[in-house]
Image (cartoon, rainbow, N blue to C red):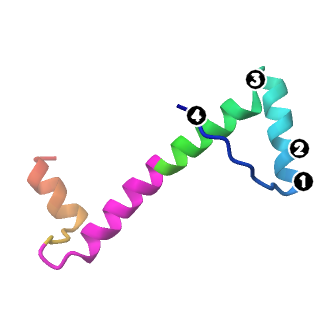
Amino acid sequence: MSVSISVRLPEEVARALEELAKVTERPKTFLIRKALESYLGEYADFQIALDRLRDKDDAVISRAELRKRLGI
């Protein structure tokens, strides 16, 4: 099921979206949906990383220690 929303974009973003839609021959809706999916996935990963950094029980190790543990 799809849900319709409306968004106000700055003119330069709207122009860039229009140009990308023309160049890729894709609807603007498709491009916006893909951009949001990508952003939300990246944001979720970012939040997980921040949560792990803030977790006092989850030790932070150096790059050298990681390489040692991996046998590199």
State yes or no: discs 4 and 1 in contact (Cβ < 8 Å).
no
State yes or no: discs 2 and 4 in contact (Cβ < 8 Å).
no
| Residue span colored magenta | 41-57
Q: Nearer the viewer, mark 4 or mark 1?
A: 4
* Label 1: few (<14), some (14–19) or many (≥20) C-alpha neighbours in 10 Å: few
- Left or right of residue 54, residue 8 in this image: right
Q: The residue under label 2 is which amino acid type?
A: Arg
Q: What residue is pinned by disc 3?
A: 24
Furthest residue toward top: 25
Q: What residue is pinned by disc 4?
A: 2
Q: How far across and down, in percent of the image, does residue 4 sit?
A: 67, 41
Secondary structure predominantly adopted by residues drawn in magenta: helix
State yes or no: discs 4 and 3 in contact (Cβ < 8 Å).
no
Work out whether residue 60 or residue 37 is closer to the camera in this orientation and state it. 37
State yes or no: discs 2 and 1 in contact (Cβ < 8 Å).
yes
- Asked where in the image residue 8 lies, by quadrant, the reply is bottom right
Q: In the rendered structure, does residue 22 fall within the stretch colored magenta?
A: no
Q: What residue is pinned by disc 1?
A: 11
Q: CA distance from mark 3 to mark 2?
A: 14 Å
